[in-house]
Amino acid sequence: MDLYHLGPVGWVESQSIYHALALLDHEGLVICYPTTPYICLGLHDDLDYEIDRTYCRERGIPLLRRETGGGIVYLDNRQLFFQLVLRQDNPLLPLRRHRFYEKFLQPAISVYRNLGIAVELKPPADITAMGRKYSGNGSGDIGRCTAYVGNILLDFDFVTMSRALRVPDETFRRHLYRIMRANIITLADCLEHPPERSALTTGLIAGFEEQLGDLSPRGLDAELRETALRVGERLTSREWLDLPGRRPAERKVKIAEGLYLLAQQTAGQGRNVLLVRDGIAKKITAGNDAMEPASPVGA
Amino acid sequence: MENRAIPDDLFYDRSDYWIKVDKEVVIGLTDHGQGNIGDIIYLEISPVGTIVRQGGRCGSIESGKWVGSLLAPISGVIVETNRKAEADPHQVNADPFGCGWLYRMEPADRNEIARLMDSDAYKAWIEERIRLEAQDGAVR
């Protein structure tokens, strides 16, 4: 298996290289991070439903739509990406695609545990500890390959993430910020001295070698660069970004597995904000604004 | 063998689609296929009039943390899509051979249908995959 240990790359390349590998039918593991921030939509996210385009334009935050699943994410250089491309006929790949997350996320789980953070897998694809989410992950079939993508959060800009999403009103946004903050955790939150990125990378590579066997370091050859360039242009094109997607009748934002914030229109002119946790909805009242941050899922 | 329905009056392909042959053909995901995909949260089928080749992409499907393509089991023209299933993709999970059908197609070459699997062959093929899974330690 080839290893593309790329370190810092441009924001488009942080997505386009693994897409290019898949389209070229090349298996490989990519480890990288973007030098500048951007917002990344899942394949079926609807841009106008999800994103405040004006805010993103004013802040100079570019947009990209990937071909893998999962929802909208704000990505920047405080995250470390790991992206695995496997051919669909690879015996490692289960028919039940979501079951491969058990293997795919094990290296990241080991990294966290070696840092003294007792994380576990919350199926299908969250890494959690004490009910708080540590990692965002997704997968998708691209060409004749399947790509699994994940990240380790060194830190996270909750303000920009909550501000960039389109929401029905500022009360909803306030709740969104609080609930994200309470249910997503980063290395900066739990370690006095966050580890060097190189140490995290070394840990990830060691973990993936246990899963995949020896990894052979590779650089980007001309074919891969050219394909990534073409793919990147497509993933950021206006036509591709404007593809229609999911538009639930009521605004719904996924925070973590089993946790959603939902805006529900009432019979009158008002609107309720509901926190849906493992299928059970709970109304958040205005008075909750003065509360301590919402309890994490499962805590 | 997992307990999944495999009706006798249908044809099947290796991407877990069923094909019901009439004047036109009706296509859907098998019970085994929808079980492998998991809870479907988004379904998009290529519009009526789209011409697809056997094995070609004719839509997109998402479940939880995975996105994949719908692949045409035979070549032809899509003549109707199941709008209710697109609006409520859970129907594909709940009733894959009934309300959860995907689309109707006018086949381009009925010889392609003759080369698909019948229910016995499909059942044997699933069993083989499950056997390989146990052997490899992965659900193939």
Image: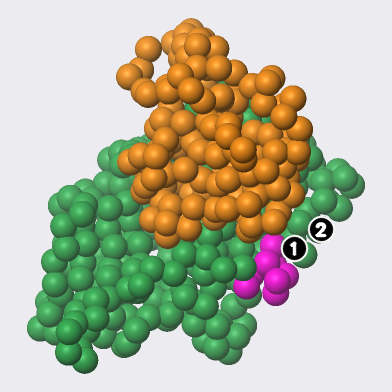
Q: What's the magenta region?
A: A235-242
Q: Residue A156 lies in magenta, yes or no?
A: no
- From the image, state the color of chain A: green
Residue carrying label 2: A230
- Of A246 and A5, nearer the camera is A246
Q: Secondary structure at mark 2?
A: helix
Q: Cβ–Cβ below 8 Å for labels 1 and 2?
A: yes
In the rendered view, tell whether residue A45 sits above or below residue A145.
below
**Numbered disc 1: what chain?**
A
Image x and y of residue A133, in percent: 33, 53
- Of B46 and A98, nearer the camera is B46
Q: Quadrant of the N terminus of chain A?
A: top right
Image x and y of residue A200, in percent: 51, 44
What amino acid type is highlighted by mark number 2? Arg
Identify the image quadrant of residue B121.
Answer: top right
- From the image, state the color of chain B: orange
Which residue shows up at 16% across the image and 57% down it? Answer: A280
Residue carrying label 1: A234
Q: How many numbered marks have been drawn onto this rendered protein structure?
A: 2
What amino acid type is highlighted by mark number 1? Arg
Viewer can see residue A93: no
**Numbered disc 2: what chain?**
A
